[in-house]
Amino acid sequence: MARPCLGWVLDMGGILLDRKRIDQTKRNEHKRRRIASSKIEDIRDGLLYFIGRYEEWGILSAAFPALGCGNGGLEWDTVGPLMFQLLSQAKIPIEIYAPFGTPEYKLTYPFLCQK
C-alpha cells in the first residue's frame, strides 16, 4: 500500500552562497517552468504502466517523487491523490514523497483518498 513519507526531502537546488549564482539559478528555474509542463494524463498513464508490470519486472518495493510537481507545473492537490489511489493497488511497499513544505493535512489518508 502506498503511504506518504514524512521524512527529509533533498532540495536539488542546494545551497548557493554566491549571489550571482543564486540570481542565475532563479532565472534558469523560471525558464524551465515556462518550458516544462507535465500533463496529469501522462502521470496517470505512467503509473498504470508501472502497476501493470512491476511484478513482471521483479520489483519488491518502490519510492516515487511527486511526479509532475515543481518544474512540471502540476499541483500536489491533483497529483498526490492520483498517485496514492493508483499506487495503493500495488501489492508491494511504496513510498510517495510529497513536495517540500506540503502542509501535513495534505499527507493524510482523507486528503489523499479524495476524488
Image (spheres, grey):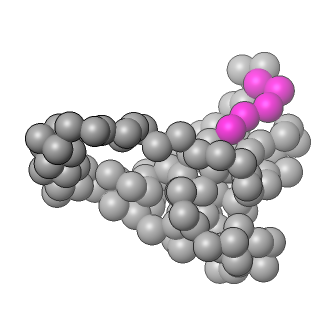
Which residue occupies the foreground of this view, 91 or 66?
66
Image location of residue 46, percent across then percent down: 53, 44
Residue at (54, 52) in percent of width and height: 66
Return the x and y of residue 60 as percentages of the image width and height.
83, 27
Q: Which residue sits at x=19%, y=51%?
A: 26
| Magenta part of the chain | 59-63
Q: In this rendering, is residue 67 above or below 111?
A: above
Lateral position of residue 6 relative to residue 73, left or right: right
| Residue 55 in view in this figure | no
The one nearer the camera, 18 or 9, is 18
Q: Is residue 7 above or below residue 63?
A: below
**Residue 107 in sight from this viewpoint:** yes
Q: Residue at x 72, y 20 (%)?
A: 57
Q: Is residue 40 left or right of residue 30?
A: right
Q: Position of residue 47 (x, y in %)?
A: 60, 46
Q: What secondary structure is the stretch in magenta mostly built from? A: loop
Q: Residue at x 17, y 44 (%)?
A: 19
Q: Quadrant of residue 63?
A: top right
On whether residue 43 falls in the magenta region, the answer is: no
Direction top: furthest residue: 58
Is 90 placed left or right of 81 in the picture? right
Q: Quadrant of the C terminus?
A: bottom right
Question: Is residue 107 shown above or below 66?
Answer: below
Please provide percent x and percent y for residue 78.
52, 71
The number of numbered badges drawn on the structure is: 0
In this view of the protein, which residue sits in the foreground, 9 or 62?
9
